[in-house]
Amino acid sequence: MSTAGDTDEIPGIGQYDDFHTIDWQRDIARDRMRHRYIVKKRQDSIWNLIKGAHDAWSGWVCVLLVGVCTGVVAGVIDIGASWMTDLKFGICPQAFWFNREQCCWSNDEITFDHGNCSQWMTWAQLFGESKEGVGAYIISYLFYIVWALLFAALSASLVRMFAPYACGSGIPEIKTILSGFIIRGYLGKWTLIIKVVGLILSVSSGLSLGKEGPMVHIASCLGNILSYLFPKYGRNEAKKREILSAAAAAGVSVAFGAPIGGVLFSLEEVSYYFPLKTLWRSFFCALIAAFILRSINPFGNEHSVLFFVEYNKPWIFFELIPFVGLGIIGGCIATIFIKANIYWCRYRKYSKLGQYPVTEVLVVTLVTAIIAYPNPYTRMNTSQLIYLLFNQCGISNSDPLCDYNRNFTDVNKAIEKAAAGPGVYQAIWLLMLALVLKLVMTVFTFGIKVPCGLFIPSLALGAIAGRIVGIGVEQLAYKYPKIWLFSGECSTGDDCITPGLYAMVGAAAVLGGVTRMTVSLVVIMFELTGGVRYIVPLMAAAMASKWVGDALGRQGIYDAHIALNGYPFLDSKDEFQHTSLAADVMQPKRNETLSVITQDSMTVDDVETLLKETEHNGYPVVVSKESQYLVGFVLRRDLNLAIANARRTVEGITGQSVVVFAGSPQQGVMSPPQLMLSRILDMAPITVTDQTPMETVVDMFRKLGLRQTLVTHNG
């Protein structure tokens, strides 16, 4: 009697097809078996001991490599984006690879607020125009638009030709992949390369987008590619998810310079399965990534955070009222954005517009550039705008936002309260216009076919709203310093209200409303700005914004995009109210026919016919057609592979060979040999009885990460 060989020899067993969900239970069980085998072999020889040690360390080594690579790539992106953003305004003739700030470093006459250094030439100056005047303005305007269109066209074309998966922010897909879904190529090398290049181009084009979300996708691509160096992770999809969770943390860590915020973001927002070991590894990975980025020092200052601010004023108790108010405003802005963006993305998906992705990118870029240039607050880089809004008005600030009627007599004295001058009112009108334009442009930008993130535009929207509210409260305190609201703290003449703090709280409120983050958001915000004493205002605003957002619309932007794209995502945070039982929901229903395989009475032809006629991903194996007691469960993919392999390798297997899954093989002379497939049979599939409440079943799917469960009645 001949039997088919071991499944270890069957290539492809235990892997998954594209757009399928992984079986967490099976993968974790396979890893346990592998681990037991290695531990058992350890005593045999020194070599096996070394192999065992390597296996134990490989997780830490893998996340170390992911952290290093993520830090390096982030440094390249930051340097490239800052140089190309400045290229829209002018060039450094001595060294064209310098951005504006580096170009002016060698200069002594610099007051960098204006960028008035002679080394840096605007495009108008290169063409012989003066720095000011109508001709100069027109030339600068045209160059701004042309560069923006060039960068955006290049980005969209690269995405379209080489890596269609490189567009968007990638966080909805990362969330789905971490929940156990397979999207082949989404974390591949082409996607990584095009995402990095496309991200630099699309950020530089001046579109209303950020580079922070895509950094999570880029880090996850690195995590996926590097996990193949370690078979323990490369060959086991459930184990690979641990590396991807750590990579996502590193992505946020380098995007904001916020390592702890990155770990919490991975835990709160994207990860589905987050054991304690993964928490430590994510912490380590985020730390390494932040350290590498800090060593590269892409911003050329000693801070690794994006918007370092130094406020030294404590906040007054009554200010919690405007802070909560900002949370409510943030929740409303976020809801408007989510609803409008999802409506537009749905329209794009189901209309002719979706067939012309590059044209759409060019139109959006053209409109953005034409509208953005005249307003100084929309013309500047969004990160610079946020920094300006977060900043405190000091002696050297020359922006209209700081046009107060102050007389500076003593440089070291605290800056006193003062009436807002005409520049402030003009700046407020420009900021209100910028708020509307940014909101509208971001609705149309998020979802076009270039790499685009959402963090920075959301922060900018909130910072604008917050700064306007902050100036309002500040002027109120200046006009009526004696009223009880300000509790006498504003009667001394120092400035007791910091408008920059309101901008920071507003930024957190809008970002919280859009993404529905709470804990990680507050940590990211105080790591981002270095303002630890403002945790309570940030928490109040984040909570208010989440409540308002949840009241006006159930989903955050990522969950809404997951639903729009139809990915199978079972949210572990949702509450389900089911009154039904397993028997009411199971497929097929009670009186319909059930496709089953018997343990030892079907031929190869019977099995192949069953596979052709049905499309199920797996089949229950039963004792016989008459007594359908459950023996185990076999996957469609494994069956196909095993039969194909047996036909290649085992002599005499024909369509008439009997397939045996369990039980003892029949003795005697067999004309065609039997095909033994006990190795691919899952002898302990997860089962529920027909009377199990549906809530329990949904809980099992979420907490155990099941693909299917079998419904039995008396076995």
Image (cartoon, rainbow, N blue to C red):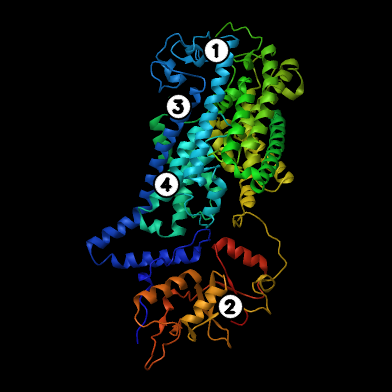
- Amino acid type at mark 2: Ser
Numbered mark located on residue 574 in the image: none
Image quadrant in which you'd find residue 701: bottom right
- Rendered-image quadrant of the C terminus: bottom right
Residue for badge 3: 299
Image quadrant in which you'd find residue 5: bottom left
Residue 204 appears at what percent x and percent y?
Answer: 51, 29
Q: Earlier in the sequence, mark 4 or mark 3?
A: 4
Task: Tell me whether the residue at label 2 lies in contact with that at label 4, contact meaning CB atoms closer than 8 angstroms.
Answer: no
Q: Earlier in the sequence, mark 3 or mark 1?
A: 3
Q: Nearer the viewer, mark 2 or mark 3?
A: 2
- Rendered-image quadrant of the N terminus: bottom left
Residue for badge 1: 396
Q: Secondary structure at mark 1?
A: loop
Could you tell me which residue is drawn at 50 percent across and 61 percent down?
22
Residue 444 appears at what percent x and percent y?
Answer: 64, 37
Pick whichever, 527 or 421, lies toward us. 421
Q: CA distance from mark 4 to mark 3?
A: 27 Å
Q: Residues within 10 Å of mark 1 (few under 14, many from 20)?
A: few
Q: Secondary structure at mark 3?
A: loop
Left or right of 656? Residue 551 is right
Q: CA distance from mark 2 to mark 4?
A: 41 Å
Could you tell me which residue is drawn at 38 percent across and 41 percent down?
68
Q: Residues within 10 Å of mark 2 (few under 14, many from 20)?
A: some
Residue 361 appears at what percent x and percent y?
Answer: 58, 36
- Amino acid type at mark 3: Phe
Numbered mark located on residue 595 in the image: 2
Q: CA distance from mark 4 to mark 1?
A: 47 Å
Q: CA distance from mark 3 to mark 1?
A: 21 Å
